[in-house]
């Protein structure tokens, strides 16, 4: 097998696995068949495939992930089956499908019921946590055998080109630099909206707080897709990329609560999937996934498989965050949501706080994931999870969530680099095309050029080539300070 043959087979596999992920996540099938799909592509985990993948970093990392994926596919199928059938049963009331528990918690106005529902959710996590623990053990064993090291952090740093320990140090600096700003903003929100002290806040309180139900009137479900089409059209782009993007916005019993983008054939068949549950979070999630969808659907067909499908996902996450952030800017809200006055000022401050909270959460998550992979036991890593996440966010996290709140392959690092890149790109868009760049047809060609590059460059290279910048948290810190000072 040579590199071109590997690419051809890899693209066929990616289409199958992508379609399976879409149909399962969209609630169109009750069970996944990941193990069966991997079984149809034994050549992609052969020694010949591994040898053919050595020419590029993206192919090499993917070839290793293929081996991990095959080793854990049966566990992933079992985990999805559990998620599709599990019920959360609070002390009062009927059972709620696990897939809707997060939505129910975020929408529950009574704190006692919210906390009780979250306790009921935590009480049923032993089985999926065990599956995740076994998955982690298999991955470690495979990495050690394939790469000759039991240091997962060092191995993943080499495979991805992301220096994880260095990024973790940046995260520590970010957490320190924003600690006072965040503490003050958190105290303000908890006192005003929940009437509780910071030391009493729990993770379920965060879900309710960031739900932002008070602003629902500005973000109706009926206007969601038409507004997206209008605004992307104002930008000079096609919101469905000539029909290559399909919006799946309906509610189904088994549909995943979290919105996602499923690239099934890049750039020709891309699904944007969302299960609406009310208000601004739907819009925020939709615009985030719209950034992904436009990226995949506008990738040049001239790019190699690994440049369209693989590479550094910090780049596609950057575009998702760019679109997500645009709908929290004053000019966008005035034009498309018709929001103004004191309501606008309050909403902007709330969203700036939510962004800071999210980035701090992921900074802590990366530190936890590094600690987990170096911990003497999974139990020790889980304890570290609760400690680090609680400290960073001010909301109490429980060890029982540790293995389920774990990003495969240190994907949390991709998000963090994406926030760095997005803040830099956003500042450049404003400088070049003014604060209403999102409706300026002159900015469309510039953005389309970036999207057409797929993931040929990683985040560091793209920042340098397109923006003449280096990745850091500085632009993001400055933005948060300006909004929350």
Image (spheres, rainbow, N blue to C red):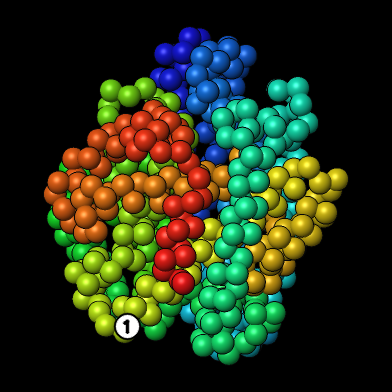
Question: Dot 1: within a 10 Å radius of its alpha carbon, few (fewer than 14), some, or many (20 or more) residues?
Answer: few
With 140 as the anchor, is 338 left or right in this view? left
Residue 14's place in the image compared with 230, above or below, is above
Q: Among all residues in the image, which is located at the extreme right?
A: 376
What residue is drawn where x is 22% and y is 40%?
446
Which residue has dot 1 on it? Answer: 343
In the rendered image, which quarter is residue 71 located in? Answer: top right
Q: Left or right of 373: which side holds 265?
A: left
Front residue (pair 53, 184): 184
Q: Would residue 129 be visible to someone looking at this image?
A: yes
Q: Quadrant of residue 465?
A: top left
Residue sitting at the far top: 2
Q: x, y percentage for residue 433?
A: 20, 50
Expressed as whole percent of the image width and height from the top left, the position of residue 390 reads 69, 67
Which structural element holds mark 1?
A: helix
Q: Is residue 293 visible?
A: no
Residue 156 at x, y percent in the picture: 64, 33
């Amino acid at each position: 097998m040579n590199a071109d043959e590997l690419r051809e087979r890899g693209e066929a596999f990616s289409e199958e696995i992508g379609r399976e992920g879409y149909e399962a996540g969209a609630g169109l099938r009750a069970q996944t068949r990941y193990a069966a799909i991997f079984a149809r592509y034994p050549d992609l985990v052969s020694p010949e495939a591994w040898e053919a993948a050595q020419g590029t970093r993206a192919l090499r990392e993917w070839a290793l992930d293929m081996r991990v994926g095959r080793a854990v596919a049966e566990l992933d199928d079992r985990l999805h089956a559990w998620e599709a059938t599990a019920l959360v049963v609070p002390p009062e009331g009927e059972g709620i499908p696990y897939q809707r528990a997060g939505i129910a918690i975020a929408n529950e106005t009574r704190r006692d019921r919210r906390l009780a529902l979250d306790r009921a959710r935590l009480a049923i996590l032993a089985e999926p946590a065990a599956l995740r623990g076994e998955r982690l053990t298999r991955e470690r064993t495979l990495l050690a055998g394939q790469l000759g090291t039991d240091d997962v952090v060092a191995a993943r740093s080499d495979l991805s080109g992301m220096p994880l320990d260095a990024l973790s140090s940046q995260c520590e600096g970010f957490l320190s630099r924003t600690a006072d700003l965040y503490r003050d903003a958190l105290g303000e929100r908890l006192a005003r909206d929940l009437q509780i002290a910071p030391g009493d806040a729990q993770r379920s309180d965060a879900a309710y707080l960031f739900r932002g139900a008070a602003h629902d009137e500005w973000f109706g479900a009926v206007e969601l897709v038409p507004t997206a089409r209008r605004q992307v059209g104002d930008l000079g782009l096609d919101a469905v990329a000539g029909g290559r993007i399909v919006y799946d916005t309906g509610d189904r019993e088994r549909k995943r609560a979290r919105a996602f983008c499923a690239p099934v054939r890049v750039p020709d068949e891309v699904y944007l999937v969302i299960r609406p549950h009310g208000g601004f979070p739907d819009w925020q999630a939709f615009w985030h996934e719209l950034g992904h969808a436009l990226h995949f659907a506008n990738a040049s067909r001239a790019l190699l498989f690994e440049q369209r499908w693989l590479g550094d996902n910090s780049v596609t996450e950057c575009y998702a965050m760019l679109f997500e952030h645009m709908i929290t800017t004053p000019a966008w809200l005035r034009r498309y949501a018709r929001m103004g006055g004191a309501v606008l000022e309050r909403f902007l401050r709330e969203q700036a706080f939510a962004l800071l909270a999210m980035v701090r959460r992921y900074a802590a998550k990366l530190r936890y994931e590094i600690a987990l992979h170096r911990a003497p036991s999974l139990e020790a890593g889980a304890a570290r999870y609760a400690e680090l996440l609680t400290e960073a966010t001010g909301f109490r996290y429980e060890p029982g969530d540790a293995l389920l709140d774990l990003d495969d392959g240190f994907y949390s690092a991709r998000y963090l680099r994406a926030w760095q890149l997005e803040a830099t790109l956003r500042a450049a868009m404003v400088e070049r095309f003014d604060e209403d760049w999102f409706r300026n047809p002159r900015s469309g060609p510039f953005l389309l050029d970036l999207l057409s590059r797929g993931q040929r460059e990683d985040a560091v290279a793209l920042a340098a080539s397109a923006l003449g910048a280096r990745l850091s948290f500085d632009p993001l810190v400055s933005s948060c300070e300006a909004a929350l000072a």
